[in-house]
Amino acid sequence: MRSYREVLSSSAVRDVLLLGALVRIPFFAGSVLLALHVVQTLHGSYVQAGVLSAIVTVCVAVSGPWRGRFLDRLGLRRTILPSILVGAVCWSFAPFVDYVPLLVLAAVAGLFDIPIFTVVRQAVIAATTEQNRQPALALESVSVEAAFMVGPVLGVAATAIWSTTVVLFCVQMCLVLAGVLVWFRNPPLRSADEDRSDATPVARRAWFRIEFVALCVGACAAVAVLAGSELTFVSAIREFGAQRWLGVILAIWGFGSLVGGLVYGVLRRRISTFPLLAGLGATTIPMAFAGGPVFLGAAGLFAGLLCAPTLTASVDQLSRIVPESGRGEAIGWHGAAMTLGNGVGSSVAGIAIDAGGYAAGFGASAALGLIPGVGLALLVGAAQRRSAVRRQESARRAFEKTA
């Protein structure tokens, strides 16, 4: 707890974490409401809802890197102002139109998506030092989990009182207002002691190397495990005939992630992303052998323990290999990889469930973490050893020349 007290004693970190928790709630609510709006109000099919969600997901993923690069070059306010304006215009009309115009407007809004995740993570990194960054990022990850648990519940509950048209409009306007709040708060995205002579963004080739690409692939795989597991929970609970326990099981799984994230944040030594990813895959395997909701809940609690730590370690490792003036774009690529992982995990798990039931779904989800985790650890380890050998050889040659 001392580590967290030290982090929260900084008003800059407290403000960023609170801001991040608030603005993410409408983000997670909106993704669920889009599908409900298509099916319930527009009387469309689940295929149409899936196509809409997929297109919006792709547009948001594409927007991540270039919006992040603008954050590095233009600053926060000049970057998100167009996002606020485009979002306000698109979502003023989108909830009230038919399916095809909704598809177009949602796609345009996705391309100009307010880079909330990039801004919050970059601000947390800028407000912390190497010593207290790990617990700060752990709290940031926990706030994401909390928003993910609260946002969809509030959004779906509101549709029981008002139409999806009204709720979707209100939620998206809340997201626009969240962007306005971020614009006014304007949290620093670079540390106060940064040398201004190095403030110009570094060339992408300086950090877009094997370890960074491996981190993006690892983040994609981690989210794929989570997305695949989430879909498979639904399949398992339906097969058990215990649909009323679905919310409880998912909450237990999320609670395990909260606990794991908080524990990871106070560890004195850093753990590489890739062993954690392999562990996330391995701890998912026991859920494939669940014979009922009780065993599934217990296994889900166990599997959840490595969810938040894996993603936290990935962002922490990124902050140490990417120069400060390039982190906006780097976090944008990282976020795009996680968005891609959401689609990959759901698709792979869905195919596996159709072929072999929930056991196959959990098995496929586990493989999405276990295999890349081991492979990336070996690849990055070999690359680091080769780099160390080259540095030693260069040092030896320099010494021989001076001798």
Image: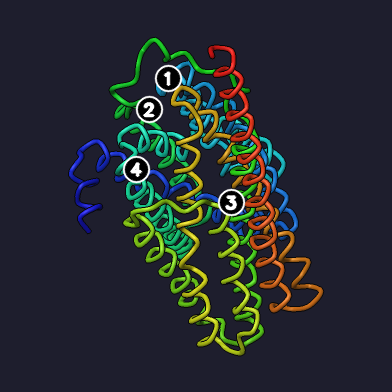
Camera-side residue of 187 and 248: 187
Q: Can see residue 106?
A: no
Q: Can see residue 326?
A: yes
Label 1: element kind: loop
Q: Locate residue 319: give its quadrant.
A: top left
Measured in 3D between alpha carbons, the distance from the residue under mark 2 to the one under mark 1, in whole angstroms, is 8 Å
Say if 302 sits above or below 290 in the image: above
Determine whether label 1 and label 3 are within 8 Å by CB: no
Q: Residues within 10 Å of mark 3 (few under 14, many from 20)?
A: many
Ranked by sequence position, the earlier of labels 2 and 4 is 4
Residue 359: horizontal and vertical position, in percent? 70, 79
Residue 223: horizontal and vertical position, in percent? 59, 55
Mark 4, residue position: 133
Q: Quadrant of the N terminus?
A: bottom left
Say if 379 sits above or below 294 in the image: above
Q: Amino acid at mark 4?
A: Arg
Determine whether label 2 and label 1 are within 8 Å by CB: yes
Mark 3, residue position: 34
Checking the image for residue 189, the label placed there is 2
